[in-house]
Amino acid sequence: MAKSIAQEFTKGLWEEIPPFRLVLGLCPVLAVTKTVENGIGMGLATTFVLVCSNILVSSLRKVIPGKVRIACFIIIIATFVTVVELVMQAFTYPLFLKLGIFIPLIVVNCVVLGRSEAFAFKNGVVRSLADGLGIGIGFTLALAALGAVRELFGNGTLTIWETPIQIFGPAFQPFTFMVEAPGAFICLGLMLCLMNLVSSK
Amino acid sequence: MREMIKMIVVLTVLSSFSGGLLAAVRNKTIDRIEVQQLTFVKGPAIQAILEGASNDPIVDRFKLEYEGGEASFFVGVFNGEPAKIAFESAGKGFGGEIGLMVGVDIKADKIIGVGVTTHSETPGVGSKAQTDPSFTKQFQDMDLMSTFQVKTDGGQIDIITGATITSRGVAIGVTQAGALYKSLKPQIEAKLKEFK
């Protein structure tokens, strides 16, 4: 059962990639992935919170009494989320405007709380760091991939840094269904299906 | 009992630590956030009102205190003189407060433009106050010191179809802007003199 630290890191990238394998934290996954940029921004914000809260939870795990652990996790997570919110407002305001309410909602993202409860509270600091980083990057990749597919078909563009890049020519008729809410569900379903197909072989 | 005390101590220490951290981060970012908000939320309205100014109105701003608050004034330099200013006001709309940016020509006390910065009005109906310039254009060249009312209330402003309350909110906001301008005019003029 004992995994190496490298394995703790890489498991988040495929084996336990949050939205597809753990099927956790779907609210931001479905809501913000209208463009690649939004997906990456949301993913990075979540990664920061995950890494910081994992480190703090695991280093305090011997001090925190079991009965109030969830309350302690929430305090820690909420603090880092607010830090991210303030920093984003100060440095990437347009992105903050687009992600809007979903940044404060990282507090209730099951991925973050789930990692604290299931992993960081039981493991050492270095392992928790590797776990948080792996899961966070996996989350970011998943959001970016979903955002890319939706934006590409829904809008014909890819937005990496503020300016959209036209992929298809001007004759492209956007499949706007993809950037709306039902498109998010269908796209997520198809990607889950694809991942299961690949890994079942 | 010991466990109880431990729980309380841990939670208290943790909360105070996070409170302190957040206060520090807020302190460090508050100025930058203000600049960002000015650039991205109020910026477009300010630029539209003070179009053609030879300076950057967002940089050349000053604050004045009045009874019950503080207001920021954005200076527009035209032909080498700080002749026009824009400042904020607000009126109560259908879905909450409507944030306004009101521009005025200092010499003539005439409105040069009104823009909606923030609102939570019904999309497609009340939101036209922000997107349809023909509504806010009505205020142009009117005397800022006068009272504005929508035509339904016997005033001079045409309403946006289906959005009487929004239109009324904007009219009230502009009227309040006039009152604020009137009460602060000596200070504004003094500040503008320093500006030269």
Image (spheres, rainbow, N blue to C red):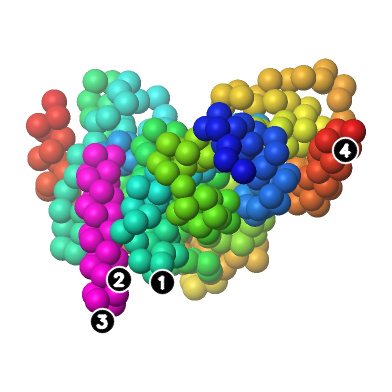
Real-space Cα distance between discs 3 and 2? Answer: 10 Å
The residue that mark 1 highlights is A67
For residue B60, say whether it is visible: yes
Write the residue at 15% across / 63% down: B67
The residue that mark 3 highlights is B1
In the image, the segment drawn in magenta is B1-29
The residue that mark 4 highlights is A200
Decide: few, some or many residues near mark 3? Use Cα within 10 Å; few <14, some 14-19, many ≥20. Answer: few
The lab-note entry on whether marks 3 and 4 share a chain reads no
Asked whether, in this view, residue B23 is left or right of residue A85, the answer is left
Real-space Cα distance between discs 2 and 1? Answer: 8 Å
Chain of the residue that carries numbered disc 1 in the rendered image = A
Write the residue at 30% across / 71% down: B7
Chain of the residue that carries numbered disc 2 in the rendered image = B
**Tag in front: 3 or 2:** 3
Considering the numbered disc 3 on the image, is that residue within a helix, a strand or a loop? loop
Considering the numbered disc 1 on the image, is that residue within a helix, a strand or a loop? helix
Considering the numbered disc 4 on the image, is that residue within a helix, a strand or a loop? helix
In terms of depth relative to the viewer, which is nearer, A199 or B34?
A: A199
- Estimate the x, y position of residue A55 in percent, counting from the top left: 40, 43
**Tag in front: 1 or 3:** 3
Write the residue at 31% across / 59% down: A63
- Residue B2 against residue A58 in the figure, above or below: below
Amino acid type of disc 2?
A: Met
